[in-house]
Image (cartoon, helix red, strand yellow):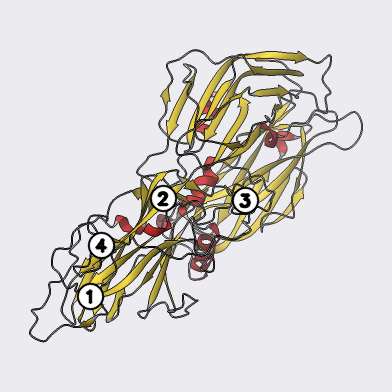
Amino acid sequence: MTHISPRTALRRAAGSLTAAGLLAAASLAGAAAPASAADAAVFTLGGPAETALHPYPESGEPQHSTVGISVNNPSQDDEDGGYGGQFTLTFDLSGIDGVADVAFDGESGSADCEITGTKAVCEDWGIWPGRQDVADLLVTAAEGSEDGETGTIKVTGEAEGVTFTPFTTRLTVGGPDLVMEQLPFDQELNPGDKQQAPITFMNRGSRDADGVLLTLLYSRGLDIPQRYTNCEYTVADPDVPGIGFTTALCSVEGSFEAGETYTLATPLTIEATTRAFYDTFVYRVHEDGAAQRAAQRAGATFERGDGSVLKAVPVKKKSAVARGADLDPTDNQQEADFRTKNTADFVAYGDEASGAAGTTVKADIGFRNEGPAWIGYIRSGEEVATVDFTVPQGASVTAKPDRCRAVTAEGKYREDQKSPAPRYVCDTSMTVRDGAGLDLPFELRIDKALIGASGEVTVRNTWLQNPALPFDPKPANNTAFLVLNGEGEGADSGGTTGGSDGGSGEPSTSPTPVPEESPSGTSGSSASSTSGGGSAGTTGGSGGGGGLASTGSIALIASGTAAAALAAGLLLFTAARRRAAAPRV
């Protein structure tokens, strides 16, 4: 499975990294270096503050650690904020002489690097807005180095018209190596199920750890009822779209000796709530410290618990510790995915608008998730659903949300995205919370005023060939209608068009031209709804006041199988899953 971190989650919720990279690269092509020192850009060099090195082994080759060096361009201007010139990074290695040996990873980064004695130079071109990796140093303990020896590497940068903030990183031989044990969870659950989580970790390093920081992340459908006094908690803002991870940071005091294994004095309880569906629990351990706590907080606001104290106790003790022990920080974390038998009712809503030929009207369409489950495809990053909108006869779309794309009348790819199309599809993000949905504001020009012209608004699977939502037990309310110039005035929220349609929300007759003596309609939508900017995850129910929801039966093909490609995270490996049969989280 793809490993999850808070940064990974946020990046996915925000959008495609690939698209952002292409945009940034394109902006570099036209960017020029600053004209004068007064206008010089200031870029910041960065990387890990400290890295532990595997002690030099008594036999065999030393194991290396990686120190990634990055540069941050603080500009927010994707178009003109890039630096399109040559730049040079210089590494002063004199501070680690006799402590560590350095090489560059030729497989990563685009910089051309060369080491001469106690100095290394890397040359590269182009720095786009934001943070980018420029070089990876492969560092090993020097032969003859002693456990606890330490040294520093200073990195400086130079480019025409640019100022670089230097960066210093510390290398230390040996150290604690905290390794999190994977727990055997039951991963097929029902709402309300509880199970124990006896978090267990070991120190395989060459030195003791002075306190540990346990970090627990669990997605929206899970809960840990206990709130410990030595833990601080935060929950993602419910008004911001995204996964909705709860984060707990627990500072556990004590000396955690090298070679010993520890477990919690009292196991945690993991509960699948009534909104659980596809959920993830992440648990990791680091040596405690102010810098580590600040890094895990990432600027978020936390509140301390008011329960008992979370403690860790020894399980067993080893007689000796090998100096060549694994000092790999990637084994500090374990994860578990859960599939809860649950459903989510996605309810489409439409709108009504009236206007004479030549006028432009506004309409809000979309859907809301009536729950009980939230739906999130955390692992794959796939969109949860698609809103499929057919434009009413006699009208043309003049403005649409950015997330919507034009397609042909059959729902197929359409190269022309600028001129009005007969149909539009709008994908959600990878999460749709319970009580939230997707609100889509459209503007339409009435080219020909027809009484009761309507267009379908359907929330469906992202695959047109298999439109059924596999988690939705009520397909009848997945379709609503946008009606222009309905025959009756003041249609109520029950979804009628003013005709004798029995309340189904469907037009009772085919649209007919508005008689010439008919008074001109007013511009604007007759329904009261909040567009929400077309973003997924906004508060549910908005836009539903005048929504024309269909209560009739919709013949949707049963959902078939589909492969979900798991997106790459910080620690990469992939797996294939069946969408309907296995968790797609």
Cα gap from disc 1 to disc 4, whole angstroms? 14 Å
Q: What residue sits right under mark 3 in the picture?
A: 581
Using the rendered view, name the quadrant where residue 338 is placed.
top right
Nearest to N terminus: mark 4 or mark 3: 4
Q: What residue sits right under mark 2 in the picture?
A: 345
Can see residue 43?
Answer: no
Position in image of residue 465 (x %, y %)? 54, 69
Cα gap from disc 3 to disc 1, whole angstroms? 42 Å
Say if mark 1 contacts mark 4, CB within 8 Å: no
- Judged from the image, the secondary structure of the residue bearing numbered disc 4 is loop
Please tell me which residue is depicted at 59% across the width and 19% down the height of the picture.
267
- Judged from the image, the secondary structure of the residue bearing numbered disc 3 is loop
Using the rendered view, name the quadrant where residue 476 is placed.
bottom left
Position in image of residue 482 (x %, y %)? 28, 68
Nearest to N terminus: mark 2 or mark 3: 2
- Judged from the image, the secondary structure of the residue bearing numbered disc 2 is strand
Most extreme residue toward the right, as rendered?
A: 59
Can see residue 537?
Answer: yes
Residue 503: which numbered mark, if any?
4
